[in-house]
Every structure is written in structure tokens, then in C-alpha cells.
Amino acid sequence: MSSLVAYEDSGSEDDCLDQTEEVTSASIQTGSCEENQEVRLCSFTPDPGRSVLDYHGKRSSSLLNPHSQPQSWFDWESKHCRDGTAQEKHLRDAAAPLSSPATQGHIAPAQALPNMPPSSADGLNPAKRNHTVRPGVRPYVPKRQRLATAVGTVALKDPAEQVPGNVTRESQILSDVSARVKPYLAHKPGASGIPRRLLISLAGHQGPVNTVRWCPVPHLSHLLLSASMDKTFKVWDGAESGRCLRVYTCHSGAVRDARWTPCGRRLLSGSFDNMAVITDVETGQQVVKLDNQFKVMRVVPHPSNPEVFLCGGHSSTVKAWDSRSCKVVKVYKAGIQQTLDILFLRGGGDFITSSDCVSRDSADRTLIAWDYQTTAKVSNQIYQERYTCPSLALHPLEESFVAQTNGDYMAVFSSQQPYRMNKRRRYEGHKVEGYAVQCEFSLDGTILASGSATGSAHFYDYHNARILHTLHAHSRPCLCVSQHPILPATAATCDWAGEIKVWH
């Protein structure tokens, strides 16, 4: 039986004597996901055409000698413009000797420097000293005032990438805490409930939505991520307003999977354009873009090392990428056509892959257990029934996992070797019918949720496999049900028509 789970691919510096524009330097530190990005701006535009004292109290030899090379003010700024206070102190120290009779006539700034006494300002006033002001010379502006009035864009290391000027170091996406989530942050999550009524309907995707995921960081858990076949993935306010906070368009093909990184500041996505991309949530800029040379179905970060992630899809191999070096660090080879899902087990030492490979007499490669370090197969005799498994889910507390099957049921397995299947427990009542229907546990592990090809969302009691509630969510196949990690009785669903709904 072949797989039914498949989709169609839907200046250099100018001469210092002629330089009159403000010098702006920006440095962005990109490190691990836990490090904060830092943007520094410092600017100063002196008159390099006249003899001045340098900012260490000595006369500038390069400016006094007309045949010497002009001094680089960019280098001076990079060394001294660390904060506004330090820069203003240098300027005030330089202003005192410049205003004395011994040094008058060596500099003619356009305006008095800020925070200077009136006497010093008068000494530097070009109107009182009969000096010609060079056109285009700008006065010094303190850093705090400059940052408060900054408009436009911030220059990145790559000039082709520009960040909107209204994007600050911590944008509204990650700084706001939902009023609905806030009361639950100080308390330990209670028992999970079952959603029964519609809270918000989110519309905006133009194609099937493959998955929806809540942000795992508690104070950012109101953010909802969605990945669609319309080549985009989006972040929504899924707790209150239902607004789309940002659209990410870094793929040229259908986005099959998207996930939050553990820190909540970056997104990991895989697409049918063969690319796996790590994107900054705040700015929407691509941090890493990697070519897998096959259509990506699943991207899964390592649970203990989030800088490493696995990519699987329309290939007989699964690749492990290191986002720091942008290189493949491990390759897992199996004689299969495509990988449908990847699931790390507890600790990240082993992981399970599901494939569409079903032989005539057995399904010895439908589920494969791998050793992450050695890339060796631990077991390929886990699931013997002739059904493919489009999705997997790990129990948050117990040593077990479930597999969604095209036999219209979910099977439960031990997550320890030899990964035995519990044949006495099956979760039946929904339909799969070849769609990539996903399943998920609640945070306390008591409720197992699944979508259905009929458009319904089904909630099962994990311990006795009894169906608790059927939510008639959509008119088209419901592909995913994501239960909120903080809010009780709250879940998000998505369907084949591109609709997203939040239930409570």
C-alpha cells in the first residue's frame, strides 16, 4: 500500500574633507538563541578640514599637516562612542582648551556643543569669531535624543537587509504579555479541560494550514504559529485580539512544517522549496537558510541542543544540521521513499521516524528507532500493521508515545527499548483518510487530541482510550489540534481550507 500522505508543490568611505553626512555604525551580535541582539548607534560629524585638538588633549598631526591622510572619524567613534555619557565627557573636555585664546582660530563648528557653559559656547560661535561655516556640517546630537527621534532604517551587516525603523530592540511581538495569560503565570498549571465553544476565528491564509503551535515560553504563550501551503507562516495573537502580528515570506514553496525554538525568539520552518530556515520572530529576518536538496516535510530541534535540528522529507535520508556552522553533522540512511514525521524521545538520545514504506507482507520500516549519536538503527520492527503513520506524539510524563495511523486509529508504544506496542489500547473514532492529521497530548498528559478528515476535533482520555468529546470545528479536514500549555480548556485547530480557530 503506497502512501496517501503527499502534497503537490503548490562605500567605501569618501575623502574625509568631502564627508558631510552623519556617520552611523550599527553592529548586531548574533549568537545562540538565548543571547539578546544588541544594536548600537553612535554618530559625530566634526569639521575635518580644520586644525583641531584630538579628543585626547593633543594636537592632531594628521589635520595640521595638509599632506597627511585625513583622520578616520569612524575609527574614533567605534572606540569611544560606547554610550552617550562617555561621548559627551570627551566633547566637554575638548571644548575647554579650544575656547582659550591660545587655541582660538583653529576650529569653527556650526553650533555650540551641548552641555557647555555660555562662555565656551560664545568662544566657539562662528558669528562672533568671523569664521565661515562650511555648508552641510551638522551639530552633535546626544545619543539619547538621537535614539528617541530615530526614524527610518537601521543599517545591518548586509546592506540588502533592512529592518523597519519602528522595530526596536524588543518589539511588541515579544514584549507584550496577554492579559488573559497573565493570571496563570504565577500558578502551576491545573488539570486540562476540554474546549467546547468558539473563542476566535483567524482568517488570512490562502491555502491549507498544515499545523498550528502555541509558543512554549509561558509569558509568550498567547502567540500562535501557523504554517500554510500558501508559502507563508504567520504569528497571531491567539489569546485575545486574534490579530496577525507578522507574516513571514522567506519560502518560495509550500511551508510544510514550522516550530518555535525553545527560547521563543526564533522560528524553524521547512518547505517544499527544499529549504530549512531559521527566522527571527521580531524582525522577520532570515538567520539561517539551508538547502536540503529534497522537499522538507518535518523540522525538529534537538531537545537538549536547540542549535541542532533534524530535517526529513522526500528523501531516503534524514539530515542533522548545526545552525552555527550551517553544515550537516549527521546523516541517517534508510531504504524508504519519504519521512513523514520525526519524534525525539526523552533526553534526545534516540528518535523515531515514520515513513510511507509499507511492504506486501510486513511494515518493518514504517517506524524506525535511531541512535542519535551513532546514526545506527536501533529497531525497525516496532509497528507490524500495514498502515502508514503520518504523525507522532510523545507523552509529556510517561515513557510512551502514540502514532497516528491511516487505519483511522492511534496506537500507543513504549518509548523504551524494544518499543513494544500496546495492543489492548487504541484510540478510535476519527478519520484520517490519507491526510496528514496530527495528534497531541495535553500538558498533564491526561488528554490526547486529534484532528479528523471529517473536520472534527476529537479528545480522548489517554488512560482508558475513551472518547471524551467531539468538537465539530471545520467543514473541511481538520489537520491539527494544538492544546494551550497554560490556559485551561483552550485549543487551536486548523483545516484544509486555510481556516484557524481558537476554542475555549
Image (cartoon, rainbow, N blue to C red):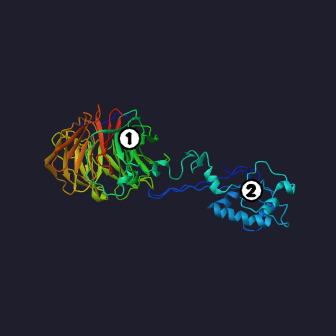
- Quarter of the image that includes the N terminus: top left
Q: Are marks 2 and 1 in contact (CB under 8 Å)?
A: no
Element at label 1: strand
Residue 418, by quadrant, is bottom left
Q: Which residue is depicted at the point 77% across and 66% down? A: 96
Instruction: Tell me if mark 2 has few (under 14), some (14-19) or many (20+) residues whose alpha carbon lies within 10 angstroms of its own.
Output: many
Indicate the amino acid at tag 1. Answer: Ala
- Residue 237 appears at what percent x and percent y? 41, 44
Q: CA distance from mark 2 to mark 1?
A: 51 Å
| Residue 174 visible here | yes
Q: Which residue is depicted at the point 29% across and 59% down? A: 347
496 sits left or right of 357 in the view: right
Front-lying residue, 138 or 330: 138
**Residue that numbered label 2 is attached to:** 46
Where 261 sits versus 97, above or below? above
Indicate the amino acid at tag 2. Answer: Pro
